[in-house]
Amino acid sequence: MKNFLSLKPFYGFHRRIAQPGSALPWGGRGRGFKSRYADSILYPHVFSCSSLFFPATQPEEGTMDFECQFQCEIRAYGASPALTIRLTTRASDIARLFDEGYASIMRYLDSLGKAAVGPPFAVYYTMDMERLDVEFGFPVEEGIEGNDSITASSTPSGKAATCLYIGPYEEVEPAYDALMQWIDENDFESTGVAYEIYLNDPGSTLPDFLKTQVSLFLKS
């Protein structure tokens, strides 16, 4: 767990790339992403109890009631085909690169007459803020090849601790706090790889209702 303690301020940085009513990083303004994908893959048994619904039960400033805030669990992820962009960048450039990269993948799929078959995701392999190793993209049907800048890859696989975060992208840090505490208390060890799946459309969803599946992969 210790390897993540100094990294928490980074999480959510890139999440400012799209606000309600703004152009989406994967193209368009609310182009049906939520209705096509998100509703079929939500995890209702994993929840958060945010201040929006429980204002009277919030912990005092400087504390966090993790048991109330997030329900963490183990999930086994299987690999599925994806089109991705993987790069090494400074953290300060990630928002712009996500914006450009998601849109580029969507344009490429459109040129092939294809579409994403799941929501956008990002995988963080390292957390060096000057040399951040990140891969991001969309799940796609099998057999789609990449091009010069877009790679035919796959979604990550393996056992992970995960929870559902509901709220503004830039305030996701408590979800990672909860996962790290849960990992430590249950005698697991993180690999250092983080995985985020963006379950609904920021172009048509208020920030307080955005859903992100947040996961930290575990060592065997």
Image (tube, rainbow, N blue to C red):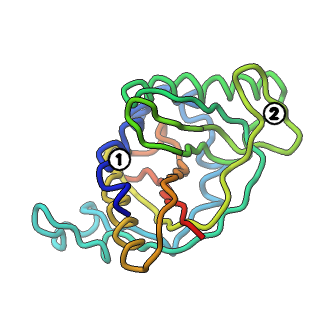
- x, y percentage for residue 79? 73, 55
Q: Tell me what residue is drawn at x 30 percent, y 75 percent.
A: 68
Q: What element carries label 2?
A: loop
Image position of 162 with respect to 32: above or below? below
- What residue did someone put label 1 on? 168
**Quick check: can you spot residue 214?**
yes
| Viewer-nearest residue: 216 or 15 | 216
Position of the C terminus by quadrant: bottom right
Quadrant of res 86: top right
Mark 1 lies on a secondary structure that is: loop
Q: As drawn, is 109 to the left or to the right of 71?
A: right
| Residue 66, placed above or below residue 104 | below
Say what amino acid the circle numbered 2 marks.
Answer: Lys
Q: What residue type is labelled 1?
A: Pro
Query: x, y percentage for residue 134?
Result: 54, 37
Q: Position of residue 169 (x, y in %)?
A: 38, 45
User: Sequence order check: which comes first, mark 2 or mark 1?
Assistant: 2
Instruction: Answer yes or no: is residue 27 visible.
Output: no
Which residue is disc 2 drawn over?
A: 114
As drawn, is 30 to the left or to the right of 18? Answer: right
Q: Are marks 2 and 1 in contact (CB under 8 Å)?
A: no
Q: How crowded is mark 1: few (under 14 residues within 10 Å), some or many (20 or more)?
A: some
Q: Position of residue 216 (x, y in %)?
A: 49, 60
